[in-house]
Amino acid sequence: MSLWSLLFDPDNSIWVYRINAGSCNGCEIETTPLFTPRYDAERFGIKWVGTPRHADVVLVTGPVTAVAKESVMEVLSQVPDPHVVIAIGSCAVSGGVFRGSYALEGPLDNLYPVDLYVLGCPPKPEGILTALLEAKKILKAKRKGQHQEKPLVVDPAGMVMGR
Amino acid sequence: MKVGVILKHIWENLFTEPMTKKFPKEPVQLPEGFRGRVGYIPENCIMCNMCVLNCPANAIEIKPEEDGKRWTLHYDRCLNCMICVEVCPVEALYNDDKEPFRVVTDRINAIETGKVPMVSCPICGKKVPRPSNTMVKRMMKEVTPRNLLKAAVCPQCKKDHKPEEIDAIIDKILEEGSYPDMDKLLGKEGLE
Amino acid sequence: MNIYITYILLGVLLPLIALLYDGIERKMTARIQGRVGPPITQSWLDFIKLLTKKVKLPEDTNMLMLFTGLVLMFAGAFIPLIMVFMRKGDLILLMYLMVGGTLGILLTGLAFRSPYSRVGVSREMQMAFAYEISFIFAIVITIMVTGCRTLESCNVSSIPLVKWPLLLIPFILFLFVAPAKVGVVPVDIGEAESEIAEGPFVEIGGRYLAIAKLSKSMKMLALMQLITLLYLLPADVTGIWYWIYSFVIDGVLVFFTISVVRNAASRIKIDQAVKFYATVPLTIGIIGLVIVYLMRGWGM
Ligand code: SF4
Ligand code: SF4
Ligand code: SF4
């Protein structure tokens, strides 16, 4: 890291808030190790916060269930700009094994623009860490106003395939 | 005393190397039997649909196209359970642990796809799927143009002709070089 | 003229140094836990980051209360910081200002209707009642022992050697009070991150949160420097050596009173904390006060 980025780069500070949108807890178990000594995300300035108002990055796990939808949307709407939303695990990305269930409102990108997808069920903590480091670049672009909204992609079956 | 134990730990930790993995600089250490992503080898696939039927997440689909069949894995739905690898009869799928995780910005990027082209039957010219390398190897020990051509004979022609006749026709075709889909058969074209 | 330039320089530099101390504390915490830890400029980066973020507040925020709270919080940390480093001012005033900082936290929390914020305020208030008395006791005993009220002369170097053991009582009281006053893990029940999402600060974000975090760091440095100034400055050092000595001892104090305490204990419950502060430090304080009073009677 250069001296400039050590002293003045706001993107080296990422505060993470996590939402469980009906996940099976597998993804939680893989997300928590990020803040343990073994993976230690704090060395990149990544910190866990307890309220969406402090967050820069929101991690969403689980297929958005009908019960969870309202709370998830409420929480996401309270995150101040600029922020990045990351979908963790197959469930949040596409519905995974639960895809097509009557109890789902998701996947998440049908409801809210998602910036990064971490694939896997559950993904490795390294994958989540990579996504968080990737989120730094997106945050930088958003802060400068250079971020381009991705167009909505719909597959032939009418499913939203992300932005 | 408990406080003494804690203070001892604090003292030890301060003067030993941190136990943090140097992850982005060093590669990920994978445990034995790690299930990574699913790798696909279209040369081996016989389009038997076993993987489609057995995938718990309905992540795989096989769709016919004009000149072949397309195998698609929606990696965004995959659970890395490797059931498809287990059920595949011809080792067309394998556990690829080279890429232990994947981060994408777009779900379209999370699609693995492969195509097996249609080739024509050397005798009647009817379109059949390209024979699988694994099947050829199992039945005829070696993957050669000759064996591939033999395997590409359609079921109807196999019924109508005696084996000696088929051998003779294939010898003739190889001499003349008159088979139209040779590149596709050898996997130089059409396979993705 | 010169003195104004000094004050302006200190006003800019000391908050930065306070944030740096916060970063050092985080690094030490990480090392104690066997982690690599953030760079020591991390708190500074967090501060800049918070300034660049947009602010989103609930619609029914009581803005007057929020601003009053933030101003009190900032003043309750910034002015003591300048005072203790310049060694100018009154000890009683300093005490009031630091109690005012706590009041600022309460007002900030009361500006919102979030239940987390309310719970945080109520816990913070209970904690304040429990530990501020010990803090006041410590300062009163110090004033009685040294017999003066200004920060310039009120320290160990200005009293005879035989009286030094008496200052041990307020020093111990300060060590007890410091984690609660700064708000670190065993006793930061009002601002618990994991239980009630930072309590009074749950709804604020952006630059308001930046002020709150800055105030917290400044409060930590000011308290450490106050302890250094009152009890750990055996000779009357001045000039550049005063600064170097202060910063080194502050770092050591931060390590022992914040980092070690924070990692050796887990967060306790509010009733346990109040019970602790209402018994051990308070008893020490009262006994100390009685001893000092009697000694005074004997002409010491
Ligand atoms: S992606 Fe897998 S591990 Fe994660 S919540 Fe869904 S089912 Fe559980
Ligand atoms: S990949 Fe294997 S199981 Fe799937 S269709 Fe091909 S041969 Fe069959
Ligand atoms: S690994 Fe499991 S989920 Fe993924 S494609 Fe194969 S069978 Fe389906």
Image: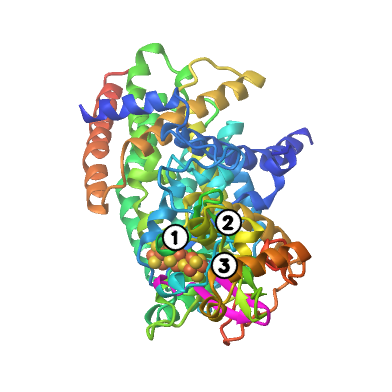
Number of residues whose C-alpha sits closer than 10 Å to that of mark 2, classed few (under 14), some (14–19) or many (20 or more):
many
- In the foreground, B34 or C117: B34
Q: Does the magenta portion include B62?
A: yes
Specify the segment rendered in magenta: B54-79
Local secondary structure at mark 2: helix
Q: Which mark is residue B85?
A: 1
Number of residues whose C-alpha sits closer than 10 Å to that of mark 3, classed few (under 14), some (14–19) or many (20 or more):
few
Q: CA distance from mark 2 to mark 1?
A: 28 Å
Residue identifier under label 2: A131
- In the foreground, B100 or C177: B100
Local secondary structure at mark 1: helix
| x 57%, y 71%: residue | B72
**Viewer can see residue B10:** yes
The image shows residue B30, relative to residue A65, as above or below, that is above
Local secondary structure at mark 3: helix
Q: Image quadrant for the C terminus of chain C?
A: top left
| x 33%, y 35%: residue | C264
Closer to the N terminus: mark 3 or mark 1? Answer: 1
The quadrant of the picture showing ligand 1 is bottom left
The image shows residue A148, relative to residue B94, as above or below, that is below
- In the foreground, C34 or B135: B135
Tell which subunit mark 1 falls on: B
Label 2 close to label 1 by CB (< 8 Å): no
Residue type highlighted by circle 3: Glu
Q: Does the magenta portion include B56?
A: yes
Residue identifier under label 3: B164
- In the foreground, C175 or C262: C262
Number of residues whose C-alpha sits closer than 10 Å to that of mark 1, classed few (under 14), some (14–19) or many (20 or more):
many
Tell which subunit mark 2 falls on: A
Residue A79, position as x, y percentages in the image:
55, 69
Question: Mark 1 near ligand 3 (CB under 8 Å)?
Answer: yes
Q: Farthest residue to the top: give it.
A: C161
